[in-house]
Amino acid sequence: MNELFTALLSWAVVLSGYPAPAIQPEVAFVSHQELKNMACNGTECKVVGFHPPGSNRVYIDNRLHPEESTFAASIIVHEFVHYLQQSGGKFALEYSCNDALEMEREAYYVQSRFLEAHGVYWVVGSAMYFSSCAP
């Protein structure tokens, strides 16, 4: 599956405009519970992918099969964008709420372009356009 991940990273680079990283991130498939523990402090949430800031790894819900599903592959592209955002230096490891929103909007934009390029018209991240940080 490494060839698939290399191809998906290339999509993330081309669609985001970030430079190709020196090191390709690892992809680890973990349970939904593990994702919730990492990304949502153990509380119930709809997380299916996660890139911990500063990490060389992205975590994907093990119920997803990117080799069979374009949508599942798009989630990896989304998480690779987060990796590129930090490896490219656009965002610091510690970022503000507004930065987090910008990072998500950008990752969802790239994910949408990836899906469209594969003939899939699935709205992703639309709630991000109505999200804001508390004043």
Image (cartoon, grey):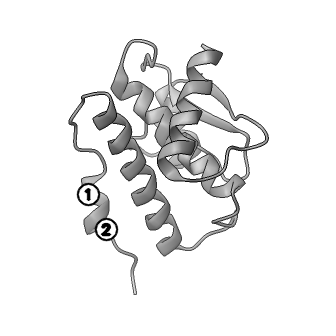
> Which residue is more in the foreground, 105 or 12?
12
The reply to whether dot 1 and dot 2 touch (C-beta < 8 Å) is: yes
- How far apart marks 1 and 2 lie (CA) works out to 7 Å
Residue farthest bottom in this picture: 135
Figure quadrant of the N terminus:
top right
- Per the rendering, the mark at residue 131 is 2
Could you tell me residue 32's position as x and y percent?
Answer: 47, 29
> Which residue is more in the foreground, 97 or 116?
116
In the rendered structure, which amino acid carries the disc numbered 1?
Answer: Ala
Q: Under tag 1, what secondary structure?
A: helix
Residue beneath disc 1? 127
Side of 84 where 66 appears, left or right: left
Q: Is residue 2 above or below residue 81?
A: above
Q: Is residue 86 visible?
A: yes
In the rendered structure, which amino acid carries the disc numbered 2?
Answer: Ser
* Residue drawn where x is 52% and y is 70% of the image: 99
Residue farthest right in this picture: 22
Image quadrant in which you'd find residue 27: top right
* Residue drawn where x is 28% and y is 45% of the image: 124
Q: Is residue 34 visible?
A: no
Image quadrant in which you'd find residue 23: top right
* Residue drawn where x is 44% and y is 57% of the image: 106
Could you tell me residue 107's position as x and y percent?
Answer: 45, 51
> Which residue is more in the foreground, 126 or 32?
126
Could you tell me residue 62's position as x and y percent?
Answer: 49, 20
